[in-house]
Image (cartoon, rainbow, N blue to C red):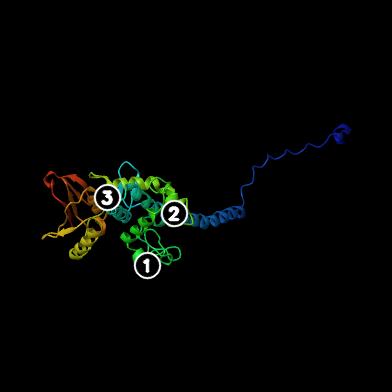
Amino acid sequence: MVSSPVASRRPAARAARPPARPPRPATRSRRRARRSRTRGLWPLLLVAVLIAAVALSWREDEVTPSVLAGCTVPGAGVTVTTEQAAAAATIAAVARSRGLPQRATVIALATAQQESRLRNLSYGDRDSLGLFQQRPSQGWGTEAQVQDPVYSAGKFFDGLVEVPGWETGRLTEVAQAVQRSGFPEAYQQWEPMASALAGALAATQAGALACGYPPGAAGDPAARTAALTETARREAGAPTTEADGTVTIAGAGWPEATWAVAHAERFGLTRVVMDGWAWTPDGGWVSTPSAFELPLQLRLT
């Protein structure tokens, strides 16, 4: 049969197009590359986390005590370690023994906070040492002397009272006149903290400075008693050791009782009794009416 000419001119039917293919999934090589890049980031992330952790744990300008060991000024937002509280109490005691006004204590505390964070350091810039980072080479005293908190505080006050208008002058300018620091404005930032702490150390009632520490064995009681009586003699008044080991300080007032609480962890005090109140390291101050009219009592056992 002969094909029709018309039929021979018709185009052949086109084959149906296959449906569009979906996007090709990532190949194994691409997935491996992504995994490789992700793994490469982990060491960098780990280093960043470690650096942040170290930075948070080593900020000397924000020393925070543990929950059970430290001192606070209630209502003032000031918290210090027991080491810092003891140093501050010694500075305040030296100022009190010289008859200086509370402003002198404020200036000294702000200065020591800036210089050493209220710690009796055995190191510093060049030959600087102690609470105030005083330099033996600049005539402040011997190395041993400037690391004696009573001596170093006394030397600071010797210089302070020679500054014209120190009682009313701007704190950082007065402190700089004594210290001659390379950072003369740095002292000013600590004035609020120093004012609150100085006020607590000079208060005439219980609880102005709230301190505590975990009670426990603190070494030989006889050695602690000897150290306590010597320190009290230099800073708080004439001590007497009773037959049961209790140390009493006749004529002492609330500033001396607060001084004792600030030094309590250092000497392992278990009880401080003053004018109707008793303090313990794990309980703080509690009203004790039977203790009225007694002299300040410091107990180590």
Q: Are marks 1 and 3 in contact (CB under 8 Å)?
A: no
Residue extending furthest top?
6
Instruction: Kindly identify the amino acid type of the residue bearing the numbered disc 1.
Output: Glu
Q: Is residue 155 visible?
A: yes
Instruction: Kindly identify the amino acid type of the residue bearing the numbered disc 3.
Output: Cys
Q: Name the foreground residue: 184 vs 265.
A: 184
* Label 3 SS: strand
Which-is-in-front pick, marks 1 and 2?
A: 2
Instruction: Kindly identify the amino acid type of the residue bearing the numbered disc 2.
Output: Ala
Q: Position of residue 196 (x, y in %)?
A: 34, 45
- Whichever of labels 1 and 2 marks the residue nearer the N terminus, that label is 1
Q: Name the foreground residue: 171 vs 165.
A: 165
Work out how far the residue at label 1 is from the one at label 3, CA to CA, in angstroms: 31 Å
Work out how far the residue at label 3 is from the one at label 2, CA to CA, in angstroms: 33 Å
Residue 228, picture quadrant: bottom left
Residue at point 81% right, 37% down?
A: 12
* Label 1 SS: helix
Disc 1 marks which residue? Answer: 143
Residue 219, picture quadrant: bottom left
Quarter of the picture holding the C terminus = bottom left
Residue 7 tag number: none
Q: Position of residue 218 (x, y in %)?
A: 22, 61
Q: Position of residue 126 (x, y in %)?
A: 45, 65
Residue at point 33% right, 58% down?
A: 154
Disc 2 marks which residue? Answer: 177
Disc 3 marks which residue? Answer: 211
Q: Name the foreground residue: 241 vs 270.
A: 241
Figure check: 24 above or below 219: above
Residue density around tag 2, few if under 14, some if 14–19, many if 20 or more, within 10 Å: some
